Amino acid sequence: MATRLVTMRVWRGDHAGGAFQAYRVPTEEGMVVLDVIHTIQRTQANDLAVRWNCKAGKCGSCSAEINGKPRLMCMTRMNLFRPGELIAVAPIKTFPLIRDLVTDVSFNYDKAKAVPAFKPKPKEPDGTRRMYQEDIDRGQEFHKCIECFLCQNVCHVIRDHEDNKKYFAGPRLFVRLAALEMHPLDTNDRRELLKEKAGLGFCNITKCCTEVCPEHIHITDNAIIPLKERVVDEYYDPLARLFRHARFF
Amino acid sequence: MAAEEKYESHEYDVVVIGAGGAGLRAAIEASAQGVKTALVCKSLLGKAHTVMAEGGIAAALGNVYPEDNWKVHFRDTMRGEKLLNNWRMAQIHAQEAPERVLELEEWGALFDRTKEGLILQRDFGGHRYARLAHVGDRTGLEMIRTLQQHAVHKGIDVYMECAIQRLLKDGERICGAFGYWRESGKFILFKSKAVVLATGGGGKAWKITSNSWEYTGDGITLALDAGADLIDLEMVQFHPTGMVWPPSVRGILVTEGVRGDGGTLKNSQGKRFMFNYIPEFFKAETAETEREADAWYEDKKNRRTPDLLPRDEVARAINAEVKAGRGTPHGGVYLDIASRRPADYIKRRLPSMYHQFKELADVDITKEPMEVGPTCHYFMGGIRVAADTTTATVPGLFAAGEVAAGLHGANRLGGNSLSDLVVFGRRAGLYAAEYARAFTGSVTVDARQLHAIEQELLAPFTTQGGENPFALHTDLQECMQNLVGIIRIEAELKLALDKIANFRQRLRKVQVSDNRQYNPGWHMALDLYSMLTVSEAVTLSAIERKESRGGHTRDDYPKPDPKFGKVNVVVRKMKGQLNVAQRPLPEIPEELKKIIEVQQ
């Protein structure tokens, strides 16, 4: 494919304000949005701030809103857009802006500190750890999370209500909590956190988080709903509480 | 004015720079030893290069083949890495890797399982037995997340997006580190009794590379400037299988696990060419026919497929096939698993490869072969360390992971890197803590020293040279790719040195816009200093080693030379100049020599 000129509108500015700025950029076959941003950075705006690392969809650093959709810039192919289609790249909205496309995502790291740690049960009598593949398939699905925070960004509980951030951990943290709760070896108790501090009840399962997950984790169905069921069982069903450590999925 | 007043300032016993597997493991250990520990990293926590490791972590757990043990792992490592290793590091690594893998499980990692419920292990190049504990093809992610969460729960202080630019010294010993916050551009001072470097390699100086922006050789440069010795810098690993198409993804890694799980390399004529490239050294243990090679996947009593020869052999073979005109339309070779394994097996074993090719190249790897070619991947060389303690040649300085040298000799085996990170990361944390505890003097930082560094770091804001930092980076990448690549020759290496000298002149003229807040132009200008230093060190070392061995292939000296097999090439900075010398390798004890020589 020959070189094609595209116009990309990129949000430039900081917390004090800013605006979209248009750049004309030559593109080639196979390029992704992050390549275009890098081209702009290399040739037209050396100080265009963007966060990225692996450029292969594995580190979750380059989250942005492309034509309003939360996406990884490195996994968004330019051939997704029709020739001449307007392309606008903006920072993710839910977190405070630092500069241009870079936001302050420390909220997510602070919430992670509050999660009660993994606490394994004693080893088998032969000194090994035995877990069977079918018992960890679900946990491995959750461990695929690359912490791009797109699910956090799109979740309307915090996207539209800044005040809720104090009481709500968000989908990423629910996936983490579900991974711990479903870990065959774990014995720690996270009931209070789930019900009180993490704000699981705020989620009304609109599945926005699942839709944007670049790792295709079934956040709502496999993590959030089972956690909700668990909280209900724990608090309102004494029999279920007895069987807590048996299994619940 | 005292330095503490002028800059944001912190005091620690141990400062760990770099938060990939080695840095995280070092910080966890130092903190567990009860010393005050900080972890400083250029990116957000959990985004370091470890996250990109795919295939697995090598450890002789013996879960799949009970015949496996540390001695076999040690032998594979020494032979595959062309006997240029520090034998003691290879021994410690093989002995301690299983313990470190089990420890990750203890901290919550979920490795794929055997039918008996133990950690499953997969085949990889150069390993006699299926040895790599793994999670599909995203083992690095599992490892970094496990370590990250463990470190967070231990309450270790983490400084994210904070880039260290210089190490500070009080006389001969290390006394701290100085850098800037990426977010604000403001400077930050760490006073510290000990510093652990865990910053990875410098592959971003090449054009076709699997490395992320972070891999600019910072730690190697910090150590060199602080007076430490480097060794083996000429040993750069080109991974045989990187993506080659489309151009924007060229270099992105395709895991060796594809071949471990049954994939084979083919040229444009559909021929499995690796049978033509079996070196004498590996003849006895390598299959000669396709039938024998395929039988090996089912039963390891057969000889192994040449598709899984060590990485240097495979990278050179691919290079030769393409040069001979038997390459693919985009200048690679085919890697075919589609015709050899069922689609659901491929998707289960290699989910992220499936995803990567589907989304970035419109290729369905369950239906079509991949196009692959060599990509700059790993630095075997780096900071010279003491095998047991990871101590560099400067008091108070420790190094672990890719930034340290010795374990991987001339050619790292796949899977030996993740195990390196945790084995020597732990040791670095342990011995740095011990050093800090034993240190009774006061930590004093010279304010004048800091003032001079500040001036240097801010120079790109006031220069009037008009040089674009990104353009300079592109030129450096072209230079290293073309002149210091897989196949090297003296005239081209010397040309590269001239060019690097010229780039240094241009670096003085690099100019960036007047804004210190998250300014990538400024960051690149500062990273270029490290990249140029590392490029020069690699090139000088490559000129010095007049033989071909492992990751270092000289067209003008195509064979290994026993004389060079007994030495490391050492680089040291003296009076502002990089000096190269040769230094004898530590002698291998007789009983270990016997293990290496056993025919399997």
Image (cartoon, coloured by chain):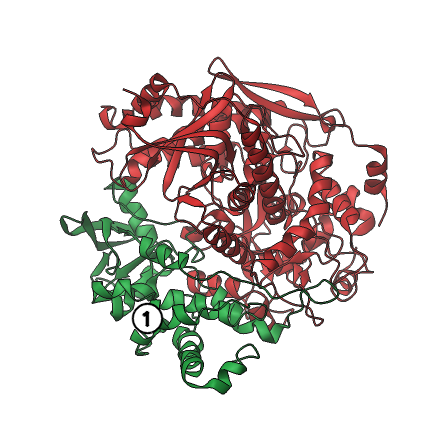
Chain colours: A green, B red
Residue A81: x percent and y percent?
A: 28, 64
Q: Residue at coordinates 46% horizontally, 21% vertically from top-left? A: B169
Q: What residue is drawn where x is 23% and y is 57%? A: A90
Residue B268 visible in the current orientation: no
Query: Within the image, what quadrant is residue B102 found in?
Result: bottom right
Whole-percent x, y for residue B567 in the image: 70, 25
Residue B173, horizontal then vertical, whole percent: 51, 21
Residue that carries the numbered disc 1 in the rendered image:
A199
Of residues B123 and B154, the one nearer the viewer is B154
Q: Is residue B266 left or right of residue A46?
A: right
- The residue shown at (49%, 60%) is A117
Crowding around mark 1 (Cα neighbors within 10 Å: few <14, some 14 to 19, many 20+) is some
Q: Residue furthest top?
A: B575
Quadrant for residue B123, please give it: bottom right
Q: Residue A93's x, y, as percent?
A: 23, 60
Q: Nearer the viewer, residue B352 or A94?
A: A94
Element type where label 1 sits in the image: loop
Whether residue B325 is situated above or below residue B355 in the rendered picture: above
What quarter of the picture does the N terminus of chain A occupy? bottom left
The chain ID associated with circle 1 is A
Name which residue type carries label 1. Gly
Res. B426 visible in picture: yes
Is B62 on the left-hand or right-hand side of B493?
Answer: right
In the image, residue A178 sits, relative to residue B78, either above or below, namely below
Q: How many marks?
A: 1
Whether residue B295 is situated above or below residue B242 in the rendered picture: below
